[in-house]
Amino acid sequence: MTDFKDCINKEITISGFAEKIRNLQWVQFIVLRNEGKRIQVTIEKSEEKNKEMVEIVDKLTCESTITVTGVIKENEKVKMGGMELIPTSIKVTSLSSCELPISIINKDAAQIDTRMDNRFIDLRNDVNFYIFKIQTEFIRAMRQFLYDNDFTEIHTPKLIGAASESGSEVFEVNYFGNKAYLAQSPQFYKQMAIAAGYEKVFEVAPAFRAENSNTNRHATEFTSLDIEFSNIDSYEDVIKMEENLLVAGLTAVKEKYGNLIKEIYGVDVVVPKLPFPRIKLQDLYKELNKRYGYEIPSHDIGDMNAETEKLTSRYAMEEYGHEFIFVTDFSKTKRPFYHMRKDDIPQGYDLIWKGVEITTGAQREHRYDVLEAQAKEKGLGDDIKFYKDFFKYGCPPHGGFGLGIDRLTMLLLNLPSLKETMFLFRGPNRITP
Ligand code: AMO
């Protein structure tokens, strides 16, 4: 919908939802909503030329869709931007049932599950509606950054013959009587693109995880922005690429939606300073212990858990005044076989934002013999032979990362969970609508 200020005294045609209808003795008002914007439509009942429209509005129900032609007039008495639309024609394009299953104005009046059942109505609420307008800008700007840096976009299969990365956490599907799986990540295929000679590739696509975890940050299907590029010296190059990518995304979001995000979600969008802080896992453990008395549970040593991530962001904020922090030097027992190791330390990182991991990245092991030894050590056998073959006939040093888009949006807007953030959430107990 256009900005109405540019349309004053002009005739326009607008289609949208009749959000509110007030039928008074002398006048009818409709609040017309289109793409999160609103205009008041005012119909004087006494005017003969309005007779037909008055009859239409008499029968109109809230959330019906209408197309209105008329002139935008300034009227300081109108709360909605001091403007109103004086119609010459109103067409009803679809009549809504009177009783809505959930409230649009007050989204929190219904339980989250009821809201998800009725997501097409739930999304009409501004807080929900704008999520995807803002996310679009975030992804658009990041894509633009990648195009500007000569990345090639690839589309890798999500139906795969061997469980990728590791044997766990994949959904099995019946593929004409044989077993197939839903890809948990494009990891192997983005590396294949490097072996094929593409210097820089990316993909934005669904990833599937058969994790039976009901947390605010896990979905069984989510969207991943995956990147892989070659001729790097170390994972530090990967970190730098991710820093610049996020700065590009957040700069664009702040510019286009900063004020709206503050108004609707109460969040200040911060464009992070470069470089983001980095810390080695062992040093992080020491800091968290010293500052907050936190001791990592023995089964998580060498890795992070939800509590560690939360405290890590607290530390980053207190020490550096930064929302982001890279954690490096994880234990090789906790990292995948394809991470390159130096002195037995995986050459990769996790990126934490506002207390949640948003990325895993690394330099990859591209030397065939070493890769094979690391795969063996993790008990991986013949089903990844096709992957190991990528490294047999020349493959440059390379690295990359996977960035969870849904988590990114959740954190950007301070939403409480992926259930609120995703267009349609998929979890262990949710596979509809
Ligand atoms: P990882 O498994 O850490 O790494 O996933 C990368 C990022 O994807 C997001 N993510 C999820 N988001 C929602 N629900 C989930 N269940 C979920 N699981 C992961 C997170 C996470 O940081 N192949 C590597 C990436 C790489 O090295 O390039 C990988 O998949 O934001």
Image: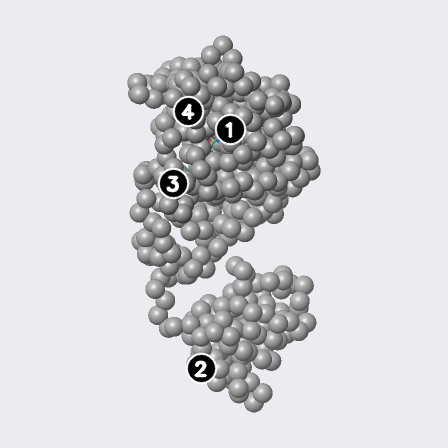
* Residue 137 appears in the picture as rendered: yes
391, above or below 432, in the image: above
The crowd level at tag 3 (other Cα within 10 Å; few <14, some 14-19, many 20+) is few
Q: Disc 2 or 4, which lies upstream in sequence?
A: 2
Q: Residue 329: x, y in percent? A: 47, 17
Q: In front of the other: label 2 or label 1?
A: 1
200, above or below 299, in the image: below
Name the residue beneath numbered marker 4. Answer: 381
Q: CA distance from mark 2 to mark 1?
A: 67 Å
On residue 179, which mark appears? 3
Give the secondary structure at mark 3. strand
Q: Residue 89: x, y in percent? A: 58, 80
Name the residue beneath numbered marker 2. Answer: 58
Inspect the image, locate mark 3, and give the three-letter code of the amino acid beneath it: Lys
Q: Residue at x 51, y 13 (%)?
A: 342
Residue nearer the viewer, 127 or 199:
199
Q: Residue at x 36, y 27 (%)?
A: 305
* Residue 291 appears in the picture as rendered: no
Q: CA distance from mark 2 to mark 3?
A: 59 Å
Q: Residue at x 51, y 28 (%)?
A: 387
Ligand 1's image quarter is top left
Q: In front of the other: label 2 or label 4?
A: 4
Q: CA distance from mark 1 to mark 3?
A: 18 Å
Give the secondary structure at mark 1. helix
Residue nearer the viewer, 257 or 213:
213
39, above or below 238, in the image: below
Name the residue beneath numbered marker 1. Answer: 387
Q: Disc 1 or 3, which lies upstream in sequence?
A: 3
